[in-house]
Amino acid sequence: MALTVQNSTASNDYRYLVQDDRIHGSLYTDPTVFADEMQRIFTDGWVFVGHESEVPEVGDWVSRRLGTEPVLMVRNRDGAISVVANRCAHRGTTLCPQNDGNNRNFRCAYHGWTYDLDGTLLGVPGPKGFHKDTADLGLDRPGQVDDYRGFVFANRSGTAGSLSDHLGAGGTDLIDRTSNMSPTGRVRLSAGWIGQRIDSNWKMWPESDHDGYHLNFTHASMARAVPDTYYDEIVMTGEEASESATRAYDGGHLELDFRRSYTAELAWLGTTREKVADYCDALEGSYGPEKAKTIMWDGPPHALVFPNLFLAEMNIARIEPVSPGVTVHRHTPLLVEGTDESVNRRLVLQSEAAMGPASFFLTDDAVIAERMHRAFEGAAAGEDGWVDLSRGLEREHIEDGQRWSDITDETTNRGFWHHYREVMAGAAGGRHNGT
Amino acid sequence: MAVVDEPTRRDIEAFVYLEARLADESRYDEWEALVTDDMHYWVPFGPGDYEPGTRVSYINDNRARLGTRIRQLATGVHHAQDPPSSMRRVVSNIEILSAEGDEFEVGSNFVLYEHAVQATGHLRLWAGRATHRLRRTADGLRMAAKKVELVNSTSPLPNLPFII
């Protein structure tokens, strides 16, 4: 049977394509699915944009994408943050082609239309030629922009409900645990972003980044080259022995929870207290000895905030869909405040090892994703081409609004896809919707 | 720009070409034998005018981490280079930027064609400027630093798991 009808994005049956224990490969390759995602996930839902620490001064801006739409995240004159289309309201020219900068205002290079930092149109050359009220011609802005602990999110349609509902208890806890890695409770993303271009569908990244089953194989070369990485407990122990867990929270948020596997404090940083004494003292000073001890043992979460924010331990990553077959995976080290810079130097070094196109880990993940994508491009048109996601389905547990299981189980993958199914089938519905 | 005698210039150019060929052919052990114990291998983000470690770089390897990189490549299960990319680079515009004692700073431009055979089969083009710091030792010239400034380093890059 034909799973999709050409030229009709309303007809993809997401309740059929995403089943409880398997999903269809056309979800990675079909351009009509991608178009639906850009609408239902990246326009109608909340999307991570950036962190307020990236734009500390008035006029600072960084270039971002909401789905595929180029936007700017800007620090306004009043100190608030706005997100505006990086596209002149007149004829659509890109206003800022660079990655970041600082401006007093935004002036279009084509006809000189000039906008204030919040997107308000300040002036046009030759105003007498316009019969419209140019005050109505500001830059397009998302319907909602909000932040949680400096993590800025936007919802283009303005219809997604509140950010706190989107994050839920799971997403809120994940961002809290990330932010609390800094003695001041405020993290700083100021070391720059590196982008890795991967010729695969974007959804392979929430999947791969939160797959606890692949480490032994995809990353076998790293286990052999560096026998004492902190992934050892997971990589080297068998199915029954690992203490780590996969978790799927309400709202499509996911976690590979390594906390119970760490056998020493600061194992996640690959060091000991003496080497980062100033940082540990600062944590104790801020949080008290009990909570600081928990932070030093547990470390940062390894988690997805649906759909595009990867809390990658001491990195923050953004998953940027470009087209059905191209994704950019961007990361920056998670720096901390309230301590000397030596720990931040260490974090930059750790980031360079783990993330990016020349790193020891993401390079292998990228090739695996590209091999998956190639395979589905040719095969995902009919009753063949299903992806099995059944691992651990019969042994996972539901507790306190989250589903959890063994670290190698596909609980995280199912958590992503089952939330995806609700979002994609949602109001628009599929053939089986409501049955 | 430094003035060196012709035999020294020939040695330096021969070294830069040899280093490029060993990298092209993924001859990791022979390539690693060219480096000193204090080797620094750096691929910065944007111009390499900042102190490594103060901002994130693509590669910022001291000798120990470079050793890890080469061990990973040599495991035979580093999927990102299994099989190794087929590569050829053209190195040109070699200039000896400075000569102090036993050390020479050498600038060159390169264009590298990579056949990314691991998954996509794409022909990838890499271009940039390499700056070598070479040191005369009892065993001949050795490499104490290599900085590679890619012309497009501020845009997203595909996999770069080989020695560039």
Image: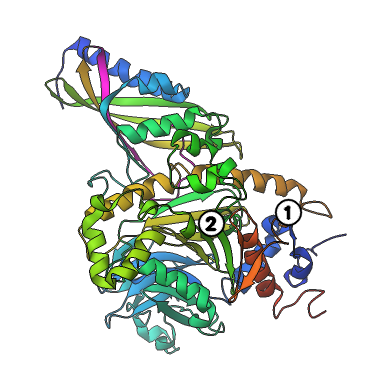
Q: Toward the viewer: B120 or A390?
A: A390
- Residue extent of the magenta highlight: B139-164
Count of numbered circles on the image: 2
Q: Is A122 left, or right, of A375 in this rendering?
A: left
Q: Is B54 left, or right, of B100 in this rendering?
A: right
Specify few, some or many for label 1: CA neighbours under 10 Å numbering under 14, 14-19, or 20 or more.
Answer: some
Magenta-colored stretch includes residue A108? no
Specify few, some or many for label 2: CA neighbours under 10 Å numbering under 14, 14-19, or 20 or more.
Answer: many
Q: Secondary structure at mark 1?
A: strand
Q: Is A49 left, or right, of A109 in this rendering?
A: right
Instruction: Give me the chain letter of mark 1.
Output: A
Can residue B124 be seen in the rendering of this structure?
Answer: yes
Q: How is the image coloured?
A: rainbow
Instruction: Give x and y (percent) for residue A275.
Output: 24, 50
Instruction: Give x and y (percent) for residue B110.
Output: 37, 30
Q: Secondary structure at mark 2?
A: loop
Task: State how far apart marks 2 and 1 are (Cα).
Answer: 25 Å
Name the residue located 45 percent from the left edge and 50 percent from the top edge. Answer: B156
User: What residue sits right under mark 2 in the picture?
Assistant: A244
